[in-house]
Image (cartoon, rainbow, N blue to C red):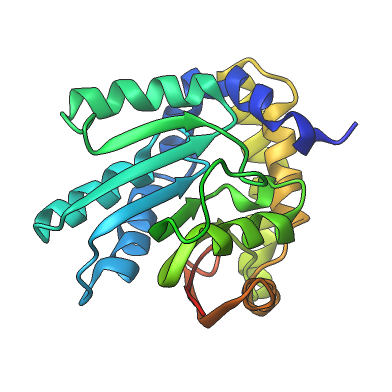
Amino acid sequence: MNEKQNIGSLFDRIAGKYDFLNHLLSLNIDKWWRRKAVKCIVQDKKVNGRCLDVAIGTADLAIELARQLSQQHASFNITGIDLSAEMMRIGEEKVKKLGLQDRILFQQASALDMPFDDNTFDVVTCAYGVRNFSNLDKGLAEMQRVLKPGGQLMILEFSYPKNKLIAWVYDLYFTHVLPAVGRWLSKDKTAYTYLNRSVKGFVWGAQMCERIADAGFSQVAHQPLTFAVTTIYTATKI
């Protein structure tokens, strides 16, 4: 069975512990990664209009996007889509506590078949979601389709260190430590084993940039962070 075909139910099972484990297992560095990623698309640019956050999950990236856009006094709204209803329920609770419910809206939908017209959004973002697409190229094509011409794409995703020593430590951590701690705290025997495999089996760096360019984007760039364990990809719709 293809685990990615059932990704929504997998994240439903671990939703309650997802944020806690993200912060714990990354030593809270994931918060800085998101701030940095959002800054890449709003810094020195006046972003106004409609934003789409693909695989919004518990809304950490959407909340950071709203925070930085509010600082710019931008006029914006953010729509978030995800297959996991439970992840979005938790995200909606966080958004309401912050008073952002009029800025961030949630909709259950597939990234491979988005319920939006062509050329709808000014910005499309996705944090730690594209590696879970059952068809990466189709997902990238959908992002390109719903973006307006000249619109910005930002993807934040795990990658793989080039330094051999760092890669060895990273592999040890992802193969043994993360799955064991994830299973223990989430009480789910399979989810964090899948997450480990999803990272190791994914494309990153120049290969990922090529896939983004093939989907119809220009000005494709990537910025590795923290010894390249994660990477920011940015691009513009042609």
Work out whether 75 lies above or below 185: below
Q: Is residue 152 left or right of residue 203?
A: left
233 vs 103, nearest the viewer: 103
Q: Is residue 125 left or right of residue 49?
A: right
Q: Is residue 227 left or right of residue 207?
A: left
Q: Give how far across and how far down residue 72 sits, in percent.
A: 11, 61
Q: Is residue 32 left or right of residue 174?
A: left
User: Which residue is found at the position 24% from the left and 29% from the top?
Assistant: 101
| Residue 35 occupies quadrant | bottom left
58 vs 115, nearest the viewer: 115
Q: Give how far across and how far down residue 135 sits, in percent.
A: 76, 52
State which quarter of the image contains the N terminus. Answer: top right
- The answer to whether residue 172 of the structure is visible from this angle is no
User: Which residue is found at the position 67% from the left and 22% from the top?
Assistant: 9
Question: Looking at this rendering, what residue extends furthest in the right direction?
Answer: 1
User: Which residue is found at the position 43% from the left and 56% from the top?
Assistant: 120
Work out whether 85 lies above or below 137: above
118 vs 221, nearest the viewer: 118
Q: Give how far across and how far down residue 229 sits, in percent.
A: 55, 62
Q: Give how far across and how far down residue 123 sits, in percent.
A: 38, 60
- Count of numbered labels shown in the rendering: 0
Work out whether 14 lies above or below 157: above
| Residue 207 occupies quadrant | bottom right
- The answer to whether residue 54 of the structure is visible from this angle is yes
